[in-house]
Image (spheres, grey):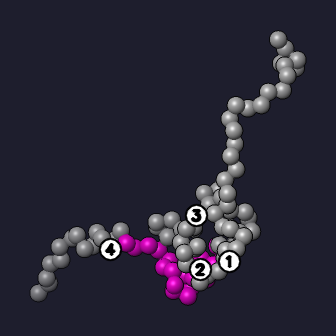
Amino acid sequence: MDKSKQPFRKSKRSFRRRLPPIGSGDRIDYRNMSLISQFISEQGKILSRRVNRLTLKQQRLITIAIKQARILSSLPFRNNEKQLERLELIPRTKNK
């Protein structure tokens, strides 16, 4: 059978649209640390729009809010927890 004569078939995969992580009632603000912390990686980097599943406008607002929180010192620029753990495991020697 020719491809042009085949009837249109639906894909067998069903695509389920994921809900955006930010609801309509949530305010994107530098003071909302519980919301902002969802969009930061373990190293303290801002996650990309594809990973976050945000719209372009939401991603811009999140980025601005994260940067404002960093400048006001309510959020660290980098997450140094792993480095601190390593330093604690290394025994310190006393210098005379």
Q: Residues within 10 Å of mark 1 (few under 14, many from 20)?
A: few
- From where the camera sits, is residue 62 visible? yes
Q: Which label's residue is closer to the chain start, 3 or 4?
A: 3
Question: Which residue is tagged 3?
Answer: 47
Of helix, strand and loop, which one carries label 4? helix
Q: Which mark is residue 32?
A: 2
Question: Which residue is tagged 4?
Answer: 84
Q: Amino acid at mark 4?
A: Leu
Cα–Cα gap, marks 1 and 3 = 19 Å
Of helix, strand and loop, which one carries label 3? loop
- In which quarter of the view is residue 85 placed? bottom left
**Which residue sits at x=40%, y=73%?**
80
Say if mark 2 contacts mark 3, CB within 8 Å: no
**Which residue sits at x=67%, y=61%?**
20
Q: Which label's residue is closer to the chain start, 1 or 3?
A: 1
Q: Amino acid at mark 2?
A: Asn
Question: Which residue is tagged 1?
Answer: 27
Q: Magenta segment range? A: 63-81
Mark 4 or mark 1, which is nearer to you?
1
- In which quarter of the view is residue 39 placed? bottom right
Q: Amino acid at mark 3?
A: Leu
Say if mark 3 contacts mark 4, CB within 8 Å: no
Q: Which label's residue is closer to the chain start, 1 or 2?
A: 1
